[in-house]
Amino acid sequence: DIAKKLLEQFSEDRIFTFTAEMGSGKTTFIKELCRSLGSKDNFSSPTYSIVNEYNYPKGKIYHFDLYRLKNSEELHNIGFLDYLDGKSYCFIEWPQMAETFLKGEPFIDVKIDVLDGKRMLSANRHH
């Protein structure tokens, strides 16, 4: 339900970053966002591939995990700006390495905090 509500609240946005500690549920939440968009693909963490591509009825979803990147040049080399320029959804875990690329791009920053075993989610639009 939360995934659907987030997509409805930010229905004009296509770029979402996810900031949270390791093991807090970023990938699981992104899987729910993909399902809410109608994707029936098999979902997995793109930790080693950096980006996974999924299909949904209206196009493509790109799921990034930037945890293993050493520098922003690696992002440039995979054509990260091309992904951002499209009309596809981009879900970005560990977005710190992408900050330079996100300047001037509207995006939704989703934060997941775990407090007393409960996950607290907040989302804010950045321009």
Image (cartoon, rainbow, N blue to C red):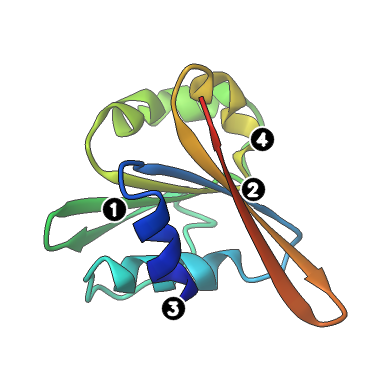
Q: Quadrant of residue 81?
A: top left
Q: Which residue lies under the disc numbered 3?
A: 1
Residue at x-position 59% and y-position 64%: 26
The kind of residue on which mark 1 rests is: Ile
Residue 49 x/y as whole percent: 44, 52
**Mark 2 or mark 3, earlier in chain:** 3
Label disc, if present, on residue 96 of the rendered structure: 4
Disc 3 or 1, which lies upstream in sequence?
3
* Residue on which the image places disc 1: 61
Residue closer to the observer: 76 or 28: 28
Amino acid type at circle 3 is Asp
Judging depth in this view, the residue of 101 and 117 nearest the camera is: 117
Label 1: how many residues lie within 10 Å, few (<14), some (14-19) or many (20+)?
A: many
Residue 108 visible in the current orientation: yes
Q: Are marks 2 and 4 in contact (CB under 8 Å)?
A: no
| SS at circle 4 | helix
- Determine which of the numbered discs, if any, sits on residue 67 in the image: 2
Q: Position of residue 10 (x, y in %)?
A: 40, 49
Mark number, residue 2: none
Type of amino acid under label 4 = Gln
Q: Is 70 situated above or below 42?
A: above
> Looking at the image, which residue is at 31% across and 71% down?
36
Whole-number angstrom distance, CA of label 3 to CA of label 1:
19 Å
Given this view, does label 2 or label 4 mark the residue nearer the observer?
Answer: 4
- For the residues labelled 4 and 3, the Cα–Cα distance comes to 28 Å
Which residue occupies the foreground of this view, 112 or 82? Answer: 112
Q: Quick one: which residue is furthest to the left in this view?
A: 57
Q: Secondary structure at mark 1?
A: strand
**Of the image marks 4 and 1, the number of the one nearer the N terminus:** 1
Check disc 2 and give the amino acid type: Tyr
Task: Give the distance between the C-alpha atoms of the residues marked 2 and 4, in whole angstroms.
Answer: 9 Å
